[in-house]
Image (tube, rainbow, N blue to C red):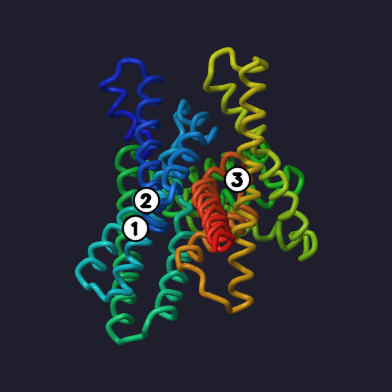
């Protein structure tokens, strides 16, 4: 609903709804690229070209280009992801310097950003968990003091309170606008679909029919007086009860597979999830671009996507591997924000293994890949410069 309400504003100004969609998504995409630029600028030396690389990678991301013409909140979600990372970084800096005022302000901004982001896609609990670990790491890496503990605790509480309040507000707004009872959590449906062995956790038509029948059953029992044998078997009523039941049945599905079967399904889902990146993007491009399917342009973009994601994945993997080596060898501590990025990435992978699998859901990972790949390039250039200086000496 948040995306529908948001995109309705430019559609009232611009007569062509498709153009309004492109303009809205492109503005958010450009804003995200600017944030990525300034974030990397803070992370690297003044003379580094890394900020420009981050900006270029973001703007040239083929998925953002494809999804900019789709009335889907993917580009906006990615905007919020880089914004959350940027604010988290500054909050960490403020905490280590024991600045009370700026920490509180950044906590409020971060809570608002996380809360609003969750309106567009309810996945940002992953970032809250990653943020908690990030703050703990900040405490251990810095000089411990009573004030630091109090600031970390107060900041995290503010974030949680704002996040929770905004979720309740969103539910109330959707209920008011639609005139329907809105579930506080719709995760049950996603877990139920994700536990489908036959479809590898992808959306399934039979699952959709089963859900629709449950909605009718629970709604009819809600309207009728109790006393009906069918209705008496239902403990709770309403759409939230439907999701709760789907969640229970989804968990039962996983239990029926056993540990090995469940792990096997997780692997199959992640394989399908990652392997479908190009195909998933093409399907969305076919919908968004007129006469795109089977054209020469589609072939060229397909090659471009494969090159882009291969390089991005390889650079990210090498960078994270080197960071892990630093920790194991105890040579130096990694930057706390790397922990935030790696934990969020792990959280997204684990959540995608559990819930419904869809190739476009991988888009939340690309902001993390772009930042890590940029840091890899920056480290590579720094290493070459150090080697060059040594050879001159």
Question: 54 or 150, which lies in front?
Answer: 54
- Circle 2: element type: helix
Residue 156 visible in the shown view: yes
Residue 232 visible in the shown view: no
> In the drawing, does residue 219 fall left or right of residue 95?
right
Residue at 24%, 67% in the rendered image: 104
- Looking at the image, tell me whether mark 2 or mark 3 is earlier in sequence order: 2
**Image quadrant where residue 5 sits:** top left
Q: Quadrant of the C terminus?
A: bottom right
Q: Quadrant of the N terminus?
A: top left
Q: How crowded is the residue under tag 3: few (<14 C-alpha within 10 Å), some, or many (20+)?
A: some
Outermost residue on the front side: it is 393
x and y percentages locating residue 79 in the rendered image: 40, 44
Q: Is residue 182 above or below residue 379?
A: above
Residue 35: mark? none
Residue 312: mark? 3
Residue 83: mark? 2
- Distance (Cα) linking label 2 and label 1: 6 Å
């Amino acid at each position: 609903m948040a995306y529908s309400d948001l995109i309705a504003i430019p559609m009232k100004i611009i007569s062509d709804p498709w153009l309004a969609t492109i303009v809205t998504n492109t503005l958010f995409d450009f804003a995200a690229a600017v944030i990525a630029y300034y974030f990397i600028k803070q992370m690297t030396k003044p003379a580094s070209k890394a900020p420009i690389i981050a900006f270029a990678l973001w703007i040239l991301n083929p998925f953002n280009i494809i999804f900019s013409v789709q009335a889907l909140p993917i580009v906006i979600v990615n905007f919020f992801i880089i914004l959350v990372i940027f604010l988290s970084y500054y909050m960490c800096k403020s905490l280590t310097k024991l600045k009370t005022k700026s920490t509180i302000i950044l906590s409020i901004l971060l809570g608002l950003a996380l809360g609003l982001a969750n309106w567009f896609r309810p996945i940002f609990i992953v970032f809250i968990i990653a943020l908690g670990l990030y703050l703990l790491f900040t405490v251990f890496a810095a000089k411990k003091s009573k004030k630091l503990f109090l600031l970390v605790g107060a900041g995290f509480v503010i974030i949680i309170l704002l996040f929770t309040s905004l979720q309740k507000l969103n539910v109330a707004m959707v209920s008011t606008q639609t005139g329907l009872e809105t579930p506080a959590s719709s995760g049950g449906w996603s877990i139920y679909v994700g536990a489908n062995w036959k479809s590898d956790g992808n959306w399934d038509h039979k699952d959709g029919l089963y859900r629709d029948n449950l909605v009718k059953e629970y709604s009819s029992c809600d309207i009728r007086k109790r006393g009906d044998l069918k209705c008496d078997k239902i403990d709770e009523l309403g759409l939230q009860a439907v999701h709760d039941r789907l969640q229970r049945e989804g968990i039962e599905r996983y239990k029926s597979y056993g540990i090995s079967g469940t792990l096997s399904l997780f692997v199959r889902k992640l394989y399908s999830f990652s392997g479908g990146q190009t195909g998933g993007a093409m399907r969305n491009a076919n919908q968004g671009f007129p006469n795109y399917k089977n054209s020469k342009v589609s072939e060229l973009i397909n090659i471009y996507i494969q090159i882009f994601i291969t390089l991005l994945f390889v650079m990210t993997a090498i960078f994270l591997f080197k960071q892990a080596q630093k920790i194991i060898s105890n040579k130096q501590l990694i930057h706390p924000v790397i922990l935030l990025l790696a934990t969020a990435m792990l959280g997204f992978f684990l959540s995608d293994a559990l819930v419904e699998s869809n190739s476009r859901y991988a888009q939340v990972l690309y902001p993390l890949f772009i930042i890590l790949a940029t840091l890899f390039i920056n480290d590579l250039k720094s290493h070459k410069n150090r080697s060059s200086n040594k050879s001159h000496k």
